[in-house]
Amino acid sequence: MIKVEGNAKINLTLDILGKRPDGYHEVAMVMQSIGLSDTVEMEKTDGPIELTINVPWLKADEKNLAWRAAALIKEEYKLAGGVRMKLTKRIPVAAGLAGGSTDAAAVLRGMNELYALELSEERLCELGARLGSDIPFCLLGGTMLSTGRGEVLKRLPDLPATWVVLAKPRISVSTAWAYQNYDEQGAKDHPDNERIQQEIARGDRKAVAGLLCNVLESVTIKKYDVISQYKQMMMQQGAMASMMSGSGPTVFGLAESKETADRIATHMREHTDAYVYVIRTTGKVQ
Ligand SMILES: C[C@](O)(CO)[C@H](O)COP(=O)(O)OP(=O)(O)OC[C@H]1O[C@@H](n2ccc(N)nc2=O)[C@H](O)[C@@H]1O
Ligand SMILES: Nc1ncnc2c1ncn2[C@@H]1O[C@H](COP(=O)(O)OP(=O)(O)OP(=O)(O)O)[C@@H](O)[C@H]1O
């Protein structure tokens, strides 16, 4: 039996550059791994793929990304055997934190190890990209510039470990819905991805915080004003910056110290019904 962990992500920036012939959007975004993880326990079997999840309402069937990742490897490498997987989810679902992608990435790594396939990171990323745009990033982790439909990655220096408060409102947002609505609405502000890369290279957290920008934020806020309320609350409690991650609805705040992060979290727990987490940014997958 092996145990594989996968970290969630936040977007420090998210820009949309245009629509692609395949219907996806051309993006340019700075992605950051965070220390909030799901765990998959995996065991080789002679039988089919089996999956159990600690979240009863999340279907553990062939549509689940963990299952699909195992099935892809089984099919691609004509494996006779199967795998028994026990998925422990801590990353909230449909939250903008790449939860499903994290699980798929963990299972791809796990299958590679269990079946001694010796697949390179490039190959794993190529397989991962077939299942979802965020999966290659989840395989590699750290701080990266992500372009194409999200699968073209450039490694950036790891952001110095930074305290992050997450507040996930009790709503779910569909990624496809957010992208679709962006087409009608557009965005006033766009991130400066060149400058944020320079500040990341200098390791200047405060300057990085000043450059957070996500073009999907106004789209999701239009439907769910609670996101702008959470942002304001985090800023009032001393966050360096606060923004929505991915297509939302999770709002994160960057804090200069653990004390500030804890203060923001306590305030959010007392004044909202959000799920609140205090974690740190993490480096690349070892
Ligand atoms: C919002 C982000 O999480 C930001 O990191 C990602 O861009 C989304 O990544 P993901 O969840 O892995 O997305 P996928 O599973 O590949 O696509 C879900 C849906 O989002 C839309 N989509 C996604 C990525 C992209 N570059 N353009 C899109 O238009 C498409 O409608 C697609 O059907
Ligand atoms: N292992 C999984 N964990 C969570 N959701 C999954 C999983 N497999 C499939 N799904 C489906 O994917 C949908 C999106 O969930 P997920 O948690 O990946 O969203 P997300 O964090 O917003 O993703 P992203 O940030 O990549 O857009 C869910 O509604 C769920 O039905």
Image (tube, rainbow, N blue to C red):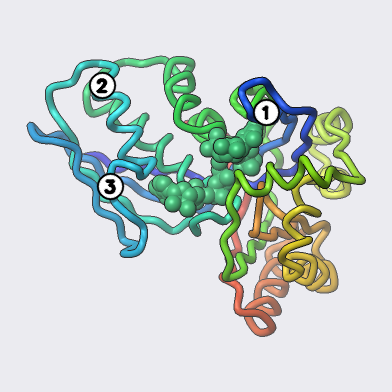
Label 1 and label 3: CA atoms lie apart by 30 Å
Q: Which residue is mark 2?
A: 75
Answer with left or right where residue 69 lies relative to residue 238.
Answer: left
* Dot 3: element: loop
Q: Is residue 115 placed above or below 213 in the rendered structure?
A: above
Label 3 and label 2: CA atoms lie apart by 17 Å
Q: Earlier in the sequence, mark 2 or mark 1?
A: 2
Label 2 and label 1: CA atoms lie apart by 28 Å
The amino acid at mark 1 is Ser
CB at disc 1 and ligand 1 closer than 8 Å: yes
Q: Quadrant of residue 134?
A: top right
* Dot 1: element: strand
Residue beneath the point at 28% across and 30% down: 71
Q: Which residue is mark 3?
A: 61
Q: Quadrant of residue 270?
A: bottom right
Residue 216 pos. (x, y %)? 75, 47
Q: Would residue 160 be seen by someone viewing this image from the given angle?
A: yes
Q: Which residue is mark 1?
A: 146
Nearer the camera: disc 2 or disc 1: 2
Query: Residue 273 versus residue 280: which sits nearer the camera?
Result: 273
